[in-house]
């Protein structure tokens, strides 16, 4: 079975293989209440449609660099996720980003010169295979209802991704993103912990925007998304507290 091109695999994915009725006619997919693949990641991509729900649990930041991506911050250090234990059990009653729920499936180009997307999966997962349990992926040579639902979810995710890119492009157009910095003073520690390496909306620049731009953003729903991002930043201190409580607290910045 030939795998799809492996260059620049997305976060979580170890490999990619196109799903097809020839090779996977008897395969099934399983659901799980654990996400061990998430445990080692402290930030997960978000779409703008998820901002209101995600902002209740996670700080929403933007990645640094020229092509920023919205991220749900689930830990303050690389490899630390305060919402997932070592066995992959996720904290109850929190929002699970669609990027996590999509795994191990996604839509990918099989040919670089084509814009066509095919439903693929990570063959290293134990959620897809020749099992006795789980939902069938094919009925004869035709996709099952389960596969159609998986495809529909991935298509919705791609559409949400385009809306997210348009949102980020609008922020960039008006020069609203700036390098972020949060300093947290831990009791009993002289030097504060300083979190950098992300971008956030510049509130001063936001206040200076023309009224017609703000009115337009309020009408099309962009302004509430910006406020969801800004309000969620207060949760960085809660993430810090969770890390300290779990014994994985960040090291304070060295004194000059």
Image (cartoon, grey):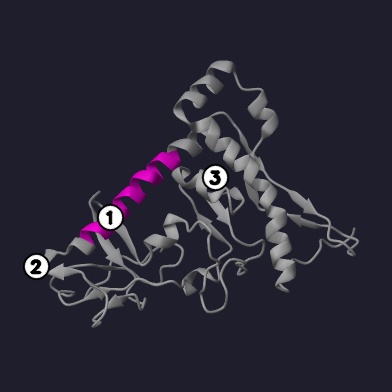
In the rendering, which numbered label is found on residue 203? Answer: none
Q: Nearer the viewer, residue 251 or 96?
A: 96
Residue found farthest to the front = 93
Q: Quadrant of residue 203?
A: top right
Q: Nearer the viewer, residue 231 or 115?
A: 231
Expressed as whole percent of the image width and height from the top left, the position of residue 75 reads 63, 62
- C-alpha separation, residue under disc 1 versus residue under disc 3: 23 Å
Residue designated by label 1: 112
Q: Are marks 2 and 1 in contact (CB under 8 Å)?
A: no
In the rendering, which numbered label is found on residue 66? Answer: 3
Expressed as whole percent of the image width and height from the top left, the position of residue 227 reads 60, 36
Is residue 233 at all visible to an observer of this figure? Answer: yes
Magenta extent: 147-165
18 displayed left or right of 234: left
Name the residue located 54 percent from the left edge and 52 percent from the top edge. 71
| Rendered position, 133 above or below 144 | below
N-term mark: 1 or 3: 3
In the rendering, which numbered label is found on residue 141? Answer: 2
- C-alpha separation, residue under disc 2 versus residue under disc 1: 26 Å
Name the residue located 56 percent from the left edge and 22 percent from the top edge. 214
Q: Residues within 10 Å of mark 3 (few under 14, many from 20)?
A: few
Q: Are marks 1 and 3 in contact (CB under 8 Å)?
A: no
Expressed as whole percent of the image width and height from the top left, the position of residue 89 reads 52, 73
| Rendered position, 246 above or below 192 | below
Which of the two discs, 3 and 2, sits closer to the camera? 2
């Amino acid at each position: 079975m030939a795998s799809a091109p492996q260059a620049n695999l997305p976060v979580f994915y170890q490999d990619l293989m196109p799903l097809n009725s020839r090779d996977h006619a008897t395969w099934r997919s399983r659901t799980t209440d654990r996400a061990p693949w998430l445990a080692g990641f402290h930030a997960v991509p978000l779409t703008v449609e998820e901002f209101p729900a995600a902002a209740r649990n996670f700080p929403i930041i933007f990645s640094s660099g020229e092509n920023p991506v919205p991220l749900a911050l689930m830990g303050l250090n690389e490899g630390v996720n305060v919402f997932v234990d070592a066995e992959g059990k996720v904290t109850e009653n929190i929002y699970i980003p669609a990027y996590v729920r999509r795994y191990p499936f996604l839509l990918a180009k099989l040919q670089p010169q084509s814009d066509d997307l095919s439903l693929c999966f990570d063959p290293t997962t134990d959620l897809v295979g020749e099992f006795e349990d789980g939902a069938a992926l094919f009925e004869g040579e035709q996709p099952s209802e389960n596969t159609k639902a998986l495809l529909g979810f991935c298509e919705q995710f791609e559409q949400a991704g385009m809306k997210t890119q348009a949102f980020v492009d609008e922020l960039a157009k008006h020069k609203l993103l700036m390098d972020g910095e949060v300093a947290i003073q831990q009791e009993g520690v002289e030097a504060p912990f300083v979190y950098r390496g992300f971008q956030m909306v510049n509130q001063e620049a936001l206040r200076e925007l023309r009224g017609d731009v703000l009115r337009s953003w309020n009408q099309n729903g962009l302004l509430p998304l910006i406020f969801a991002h800004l309000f969620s930043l207060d949760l960085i201190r809660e993430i810090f507290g969770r890390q300290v409580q779990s014994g994985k607290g960040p090291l304070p910045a060295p004194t000059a």
